[in-house]
Amino acid sequence: MGINTERDIEANLQIGPTDKGMVRIFVEAQGIEVPMDFAPEEAEEIATEIRAAAEAARGLKR
């Protein structure tokens, strides 16, 4: 199992601020809920990694 292993699982993803000043990424799939809280700085690093991955994926599609 890895990043290139395809799965036939549907999941819901929510991202937003918490009342404690954290950024929460909340994933729900097949009755399992995974809340992940990050400091704003960590969330910005994750956003940068997502943007870089999107850019790399665009390059692979060409």
Image (cartoon, rainbow, N blue to C red):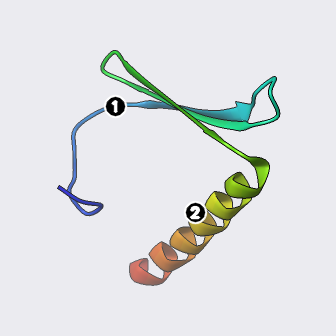
Secondary-structure class at tag 1? loop
Q: Residue furthest top?
A: 31
Secondary-structure class at tag 2? helix
Point out the tag, 1 or 2, that comes first from the N-terminus.
1
The image shows residue 11, relative to residue 44, as above or below, that is above
Query: x, y percentage for residue 23?
Result: 71, 39
Q: Nearer the viewer, residue 41 or 49?
A: 41
- CA gap between label 1 and label 2 equals 20 Å
**Residue hosting label 1:** 10
Name the side, left or right, on which 55 lies relative to 59: right
Rendered residue at 59%/67% (across/down): 49
Query: x, y percentage for residue 47?
Result: 66, 59
Q: Quadrant of the C terminus?
A: bottom left
Tell me the amino acid under the disc marked 1: Glu
Query: x, y percentage for residue 32?
Result: 35, 20
The image shows residue 32, relative to residue 13, as above or below, that is above
Rendered residue at 41%/77% (across/down): 61
Location of residue 37 (image quadrant): top right
Tell me the amino acid under the disc marked 2: Ile
**Residue hosting label 2:** 50
Q: Nearer the viewer, mark 1 or mark 2?
A: 2
Name the side, left or right, on which 46 lies relative to 32: right
In this rendering, does residue 47 appear at all?
yes
Name the side, left or right, on which 40 lies relative to 7: right
In this rendering, does residue 62 appear at all?
no
Rendered residue at 73%/46% (across/down): 39
Rendered residue at 68%/56% (across/down): 42
- Which numbered dot is residue 62? none
Query: x, y percentage for residue 20?
Result: 80, 27
